[in-house]
């Protein structure tokens, strides 16, 4: 159903604007994203979409027909209203509201998982999710204490892959360990100064790679559950890599070994 909205005080607009805050995303079990490519990615992957907000002058955009086929509310809004609900200075003029998924993935093939242990930077988390999808990984496990997967910055950094990469949420390292045992996965933990080079690691069996916090690395609890430690050889004058880059290197090595 199409609804035209020109007031920033509209109840629907106020509800959508609140989803920029984590407490409202958690309470409503919803999240938002913006941008034509990301919204189209969600539509193509049949993600559970609740509504779309489109700037009124974009009614003739090619995506409009796709949106109308979704049988959802479509809010046509003024520039002022779009600015009200946007978290970027240069909005593309489109935003969508989605329901968070709540089901665990079912694996039919070899399991390759990435465990994110308290990563705080939205760009890093988005990069990890995007690289996991590109490297053909099965799922990304998010440990409690990690930045909100459904924040607009993470969703943008993941460039739409969040709509096709299964996300699993775990409350603790113990929960992760139990889940990986149930899945029959070997647990690799990254360490800067010990373990084997990732060149020598065997990623051909069911496995999981843990990527730790940017400042403190992998937690002691997760480290204690490792089956094997990995490091990425680097020049002596470089202390460490960005977490998103390190994760990408390891995931694509796993993809290479399984190609």
Image (cartoon, helix red, strand yellow):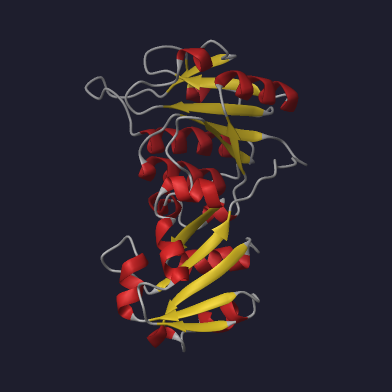
Residue 158 seen anywhere in this rendered image of the structure: yes
Considering every residue shown, the one lying at the far bottom of the view is: 60
Q: Quadrant of residue 83?
A: bottom left
Residue 257 seen anywhere in this rendered image of the structure: no
The picture places residue 74, in percent across and down from the top left corner, at: 53, 78
Q: Is residue 89 above or below residue 218?
A: below
Q: The N terminus lies in which quarter of the figure?
A: bottom right
Q: Residue at x 49, y 25 (%)?
A: 199
Q: Quadrant of residue 234?
A: top left
Q: Is residue 93 above or below residue 62?
A: above
Q: The C terminus lies in which quarter of the figure?
A: top right
The picture places residue 151, in percent across and down from the top left corner, at: 43, 49
In-image side of 127 versus 88 (left or right): right
Q: Residue at x 45, y 63 (%)?
A: 16
Q: Is residue 39 above or below residue 74?
A: above
Q: Quadrant of residue 178?
A: top right
The picture places residue 9, in percent across and down from the top left corner, at: 37, 72
The picture places residue 190, in percent across and down from the top left corner, at: 46, 21
Q: Is residue 39 above or below residue 142?
A: below
């Amino acid at each position: 159903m199409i609804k035209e909205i020109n007031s920033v005080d509209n109840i629907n607009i106020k509800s959508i604007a609140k989803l920029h805050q984590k407490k409202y995303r958690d309470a409503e079990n919803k999240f938002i994203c913006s941008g034509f490519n990301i919204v189209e990615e969600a539509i193509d992957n049949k993600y559970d979409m609740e509504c779309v907000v489109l700037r009124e002058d974009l009614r003739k955009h090619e995506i409009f027909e796709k949106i109308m086929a979704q049988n959802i509310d479509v809010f046509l809004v003024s520039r002022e209203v779009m600015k009200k609900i946007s978290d970027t200075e240069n909005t593309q003029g489109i935003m969508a509201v989605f329901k968070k998924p709540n089901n665990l993935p079912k694996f039919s093939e070899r399991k390759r998982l990435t465990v994110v242990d308290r990563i705080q930077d939205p760009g890093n988390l988005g990069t990890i999710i995007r690289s996991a999808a590109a490297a053909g990984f099965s799922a990304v496990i998010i440990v409690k204490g990690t930045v909100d997967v459904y924040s607009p910055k993470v969703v943008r950094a993941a460039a739409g892959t969040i709509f096709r990469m299964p996300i699993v949420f775990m409350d603790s390292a113990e929960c992760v360990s139990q889940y990986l045992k149930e899945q029959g996965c070997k647990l690799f933990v990254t360490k800067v100064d010990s373990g084997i080079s990732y060149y020598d690691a065997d990623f051909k069996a069911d496995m999981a790679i843990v990527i730790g916090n940017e400042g403190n690395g992998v937690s002691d609890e997760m480290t204690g559950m490792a089956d094997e430690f990995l490091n990425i050889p680097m020049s002596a004058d470089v202390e460490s890599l960005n977490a998103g880059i390190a994760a990408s290197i390891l995931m694509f090595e796993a993809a290479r070994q399984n190609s």
